[in-house]
């Protein structure tokens, strides 16, 4: 078996509209056509990969509001790390936000991965990483 690529990441959500506001409004993913499944949800395009939001209130959700970059997460690659940080800041996501606000960022400009990374939580507490192959210095 030869794997070609990651096709999609499925994200459980309690509130579809709230998650759509985050994934399309904040992260800029583009809504895509979705079949009429028996469960509510939405598909969002990000290049050749998709995020599938699935309404499933009984799913397993993280129970704390701290950002743990070692917890289960998925990563999105951007062309310009500084522009991505500025974009998140304009949407109210900042490093010094209180944990319970849901808008705290964990920024690792020079982390062990070898590229800059920023972590944040979606409305249901899923950890999302945004990274780039390089970053301009601030």
Image (cartoon, rainbow, N blue to C red):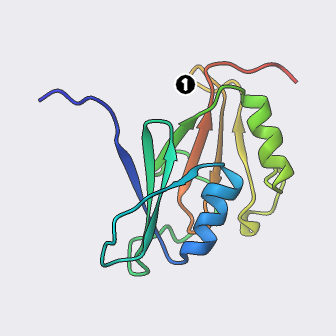
Where does the N terminus fall, quadrant-wise? top left
**Neighbour tally class for label 1: few under 14, some 14-19, many 20 plus, Cα within 10 Å:** few
Q: For residue 58, what is the image quadrant?
A: bottom left
Position in image of residue 20 (x %, y %): 60, 65
84 sits to left or right of 119: right
Give the mark count.
Answer: 1
103 sits to left or right of 53: right
Residue at point 79%, 43% (across, down): 87
Where does the C terminus fall, quadrant-wise? top right
120 sits to left or right of 59: right
Q: Which residue is denoted by mark 1 in the rendering?
A: 113
Residue at point 41%, 76% (across, down): 40
34 sits to left or right of 22: left
**In-front residue for pair 28/6:** 28
Above or below 88: residue 64: below
Residue at point 79%, 53% (across, down): 93
Q: Secondary structure at mark 1?
A: loop
Q: For residue 56, what is the image quadrant?
A: bottom left
Position in image of residue 57 (x %, y %): 44, 80
Above or below 114: residue 53: below
Residue at point 63%, 26% (across, down): 132
Position in image of residue 68 (x %, y %): 57, 51
Position in image of residue 6 (x %, y %): 35, 38
Above or below 6: residue 105: below
Q: Residue furthest left?
A: 1
């Amino acid at each position: 078996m030869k794997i070609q690529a990651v096709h999609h990441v499925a994200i459980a959500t309690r509130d579809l509209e709230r998650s759509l506001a985050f994934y399309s409004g904040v992260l800029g993913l583009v809504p895509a056509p979705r079949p009429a499944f028996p469960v509510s949800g939405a598909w969002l395009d990000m290049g050749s990969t998709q995020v599938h939001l699935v309404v499933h209130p009984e799913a397993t959700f993280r129970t704390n509001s701290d950002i743990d970059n070692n917890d289960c997460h998925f990563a999105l690659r951007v062309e310009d790390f500084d522009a991505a940080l500025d974009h998140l800041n304009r949407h109210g996501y900042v490093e010094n936000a209180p944990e319970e606000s849901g808008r705290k960022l964990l920024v690792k400009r020079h982390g062990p991965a070898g590229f800059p990374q920023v972590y944040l939580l979606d409305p249901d507490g899923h950890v999302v990483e945004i990274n780039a192959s390089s970053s301009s210095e601030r």
